Amino acid sequence: MDNRTEQLAGGVWRVEVGYQVNAYVLANDGHGDREGLTVVDSGWRWSGPRLVRSVRMLGLDPTAIGDVLLTHCHADHAGSAARFATSSARSRVWVGAADLATIRGESLQPTAATRLAARLGGGLAPVAGARPLVGGDERDAGGVHVIATPGHTPGHCAFLIKPCGVLLAGDAVAHLLTLAKPPRGLNADSTAVRGSIAILAGLDFDTLAIGHGPPVTTRARERLASLAG
């Protein structure tokens, strides 16, 4: 499959690292790699080389990836995180505190999503040095604001890039055929999912970027509010 990249705003790119699976590359200075890069989600365990190749195709240096922020611990989002942590970039890996033990390999969340990932052969390689994200944190790199959005997993987080009005929502919602809640059977707490969507609908952004499917650029906040009920 050819590499597919799309620029969402200055210094923000969507990279399709698998079929309908997205990762995001952020330039910490808003345009290049001089002050380093941040990656949000890393795709499946086998997605790493494709993501690295895509970074190079954007004219950026993969060794400048200082941080990998994970929206959550599922293998289609965190599968390649260990690759970056042990690469020449020595990237720091971050995930919501309630998902930290899973990323570190200390425990397994026995959900339908993790069982599906195991059947697909895309399990997680543990990242022993992964660090916790806390909702409300302001990341210096790239102007990223961390929003706790539990439900799909206990530690699910979204990331608002305030300078350019892009919201990276992970699997808080999906956008395959239409904007929708993630499938109930893949959630840790579907009631909490609705509350997290309501939180996201109250934020100030222009572009809604999602873990699965294309970005939403028209009436994104209103559509989120409708999903939350």
Image: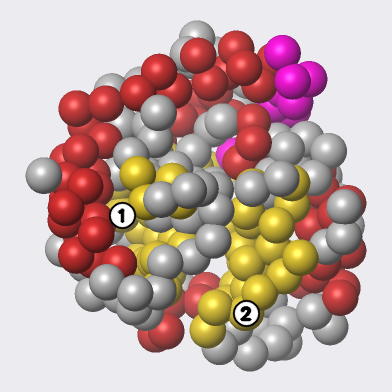
Disc 1 element: strand
Q: For residue 23, what is the image quadrant? A: bottom right
What residue did someone put label 1 on?
147
Q: Is residue 29 magenta?
A: no
**Outermost residue, front side:** 177
Q: Amino acid at mark 2?
A: Gln
Task: Say how the picture is coloured.
Answer: secondary structure
Which residue sits at x=79%, y=57%? Answer: 51
Q: Is-magenta flag for residue 124?
A: yes
Could you tell me how many numbered marks the image carries? 2
Work out whether residue 57 or residue 35 is closer to the camera in this orientation and state it: 57
Task: Indicate whether 16 appears above or below 195.
Answer: below
For residue 119, side relative to residue 93 (left or right):
right
Q: Where residue 14 appears, x then y in whole percent?
A: 63, 67
Whether residue 157 is visible to the viewer of this picture, yes or no, is no
Residue 195: x and y, percent? Answer: 17, 41
Q: Which mark is residue 26?
A: none
> Which stretch appears magenta?
119-130
Q: Which residue is mark 2?
A: 7
127 relative position to 152: left or right = right
**Residue 189 image-quadrant placement:** top left
